[in-house]
Amino acid sequence: MGSHSHEVTDAILETLKRAGTGLKDADVRFALAGGCAAYARGAAPSLHDVDFVLVREDVDPALEALARLGFRIVRPPEDWLVKAYDEQGHLVDLIFRVADREVTPDLIKRAEPLTASAVILPVLDATDLVISWLLPLSEHSCDYGSLLPQVRALREQVDWNRVASVSAPSPYASTFLTLLERLGVLREPAVATTEPLWP
């Protein structure tokens, strides 16, 4: 990784620290998601922005907390997230729906306190994190290549049978699990054995 990549990673982690601390101080129910969550769980840094999942009712308090810190708030037309930019233009996505499923308090409760950018923040459970990547896969967005290194790094932390159960209706997610088996990332096939309830 070149020096520019290090600078970008350091800047994103600083944004993560400021935003995460602000949300904690505001008692918002949230968890770190996306590439930053994978990084907190031991994956190599692949950081372009900061993703938090949160319960819909906590979106406004979260935005107020970030606005107090100087973040610029943007409400895009999509009905599943809102955006906040810090003074350097680094993006924080606040996601309250994943693949048409509302983020629930239970999803947040399963998050694990981990150190991310020198602060302890709730980080999505590894199984939930992988599910949150697989469910949105579609014919318009199906980049297995970028998912592979992240998933490979987390594989020991993931309940693959639960992933298989939740993602069974999606041909794109199911095909990715087959790919993981063929590549030897999974030691044995993931089997849909539980209720496909998520989040």
Image (tube, rainbow, N blue to C red):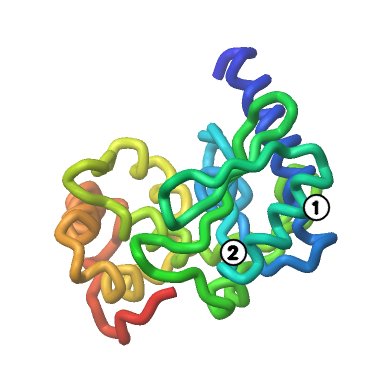
Question: To which residue does mark 2 refer?
Answer: 54
Name the element at disc 1: helix
Q: Hey, which quadrant is residue 74 in on the image?
A: top right
Front residue (pair 24, 143)? 24
Residue 42 seen: no
Q: Residue 52 carries which label?
A: none
Residue that lies at the very extreme toward the top in this rendered image? 3
Query: Vertically, is 87 above or below 197?
Result: above
Corner quadrant of residue 118: top right
Report the side of 8 relative to 35 (left or right): right
Q: What residue type is labelled 1?
A: Gly
Mark 1 and mark 2: Cα distance apart in space: 14 Å
Residue corresponding to mark 1: 22
Rendering coords of residue 130 (x, y %): 41, 58
| Number of numbered markers | 2
Instruction: Establish if 152 lies above or below 156.
Output: above
Residue at 80 percent of width and 51 percent of height: 119
